[in-house]
Amino acid sequence: MKNKPIGIFDSGIGGTSIWKEVVKLIPNENTIYLADSKNAPYGEKSSEEIIALSIKNTELLISKGCKLIIVACNTATTNAIDYLRGNYSVPFIGIEPAIKPAAILSKTGAIGILATKGTLSSKLFEKTTKEYTKNITTIEQDGEGLVPLIEEGKLNSPEINKLLSTYLKPMLNFNIDHLVLGCTHYPYLIPQIKKIIGERVTIIDSGEAVAKQTKAILEKHNLLSTSTTKSHHQFYTNSETKVLSEILSDVAINFTVEKSDF
Ligand code: DGL
């Protein structure tokens, strides 16, 4: 079991921001990544639809022998992880907006959260916010429209920059000092986001924390790979391979991208 792959899924290419952190930390693990781009954005779907899509992705990864699954999508985690953990025996790692560290670190007492509608309206998000932001002003913003543009590869486009300005500028009026990126697609927009919010606001994304948690859970279950051969990384997308391949072009390790109907 130790040398079986880690499975990762997202509504598309965003979860590669998590995958990159995982392979940096535990480079001798094999991985299988599912980019469910055909069904993106998850953030505009109902909780029931998000759970159904998460089940589909999980079952495919389990059928491919994955020893652990990373739900590299805030929207899928906040809506479906309880169901997944309750119904499958494989360990799951999820990602949710890093509200707790932002609230603890904030000096102005105001933080911004940019996430999808599906995440912001989830019960898990409500619970976390209630628990950690009692004396903190939280400015929640739905990033509607960003994920489809990122999926098209329009990372530094006028459309993206216009949406980011509309979503982020009002947060500055509340004197936020931390901005939580609550969607795994958004780290690809960090340069553009920095131009709008400036250096005074710290951006928090959880990629590194997810990688550390993955390693810790593999250790706990005695599942860390013992393989000494070169690791293999298989990506499947149910849309075009072009943007996914482009977003992985800064990675210096071997991987394969394949179009597949799932
Ligand atoms: N990467 C997903 C997330 O972290 C994007 C959700 C979507 O498809 O709307 O929430």
Image (cartoon, rainbow, N blue to C red):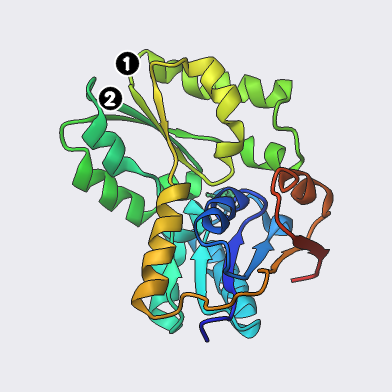
Callouts 1 and 2 close, C-beta under 8 Å? yes
Q: Marks 1 and 2, Cα distance to the nearest angstrom?
A: 6 Å
Image check: 177 left or right of 183? left
In this orientation, which residue lies closer to the viewer: 38 or 185?
185
Tell me the tag on residue 258.
none
Residue at figure coordinates x 65%, y 64% from the top left: 33
Q: Is residue 215 above or below residue 74?
A: below
Image check: 242 left or right of 90? right
Residue at figure coordinates x 34%, y 56% from the top left: 124
Secondary structure at numbered mark 2? strand
* Amino acid at the residue labelled 1: Asn
Q: Is residue 183 above or below residue 233?
A: above
- The residue carrying pointer 2 sits among few (fewer than 14), some (14 to 19) or many (20 or more) residues within 10 Å by Cα, namely many
**For mark 2, what is the residue?**
110
Residue at figure coordinates x 32%, y 41% from the top left: 99
Image check: 218 left or right of 162? left
Q: Looking at the image, how many numbered discs can be counted on the residues?
A: 2
